[in-house]
Image: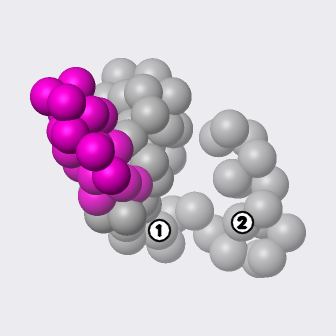
Amino acid sequence: MADAVILILESMELDIKNCVGQSYDNATNMSGIYSGLQAIILELCGLAEYVPCSGHSLNLVGAAAAESHLQLGGKY
């Protein structure tokens, strides 16, 4: 994943060292603090702080709420 991101940035003539932030979904392969994409990018550029994607987080909350409602016998 990191190689793909770096290749895309290079193709757009953007230097990863100028990256000041990054945001991905909450999957471990993206957000993992030790071996996720955000950790690899942060290693390359110390300014690239990671913020979880709000849209993905909201989707997880909605899915959990709907599942909980159904488990309690609710109907849509």
Task: Provide the residue span drawn in magenta.
Answer: 56-76
What x and y, as percent, mark residue 51? 29, 57
Which residue is found at the position 42% from the left and 27% from the top? 28
Magenta stretch mostly in which secondary structure?
A: helix
- Tell me whether circle 2 and circle 1 mark residues in contact (CB < 8 Å): yes
Figure check: 4 above or below 37: below
Query: In the rendered structure, which amino acid carries the disc numbered 1?
Result: Cys
Dot 2 alpha-carbon crowd within 10 angstroms: few under 14, some 14 to 19, many 20 or more? few
Q: Does the magenta stretch include residue 23?
A: no
Q: Is residue 71 left or right of residue 38?
A: left
**Secondary element type, mark 2:** helix
Figure check: 24 above or below 72: below
- Residue at image mark 2: 9
Q: How is the image coloured?
A: one colour
Depth check, front residue: 5 or 16: 5
The disc at residue 68 is none
Q: Is residue 67 magenta?
A: yes
Q: Can residue 17 be seen in this view?
A: yes
- Residue at image mark 1: 19
Depth check, front residue: 44 or 7: 7
Say whether disc 2 or disc 1 marks the residue closer to the N-terminus. 2
Which residue is found at the position 51% from the left and 63% from the top? 17
What x and y, as percent, mark residue 26? 38, 41
Query: In the rendered structure, which amino acid carries the disc numbered 2?
Result: Leu
Which residue is found at the position 72% from the left and 66% from the top? 9
What x and y, as percent, mark residue 10? 78, 65
Which residue is found at the position 73% from the left and 41% from the top? 3
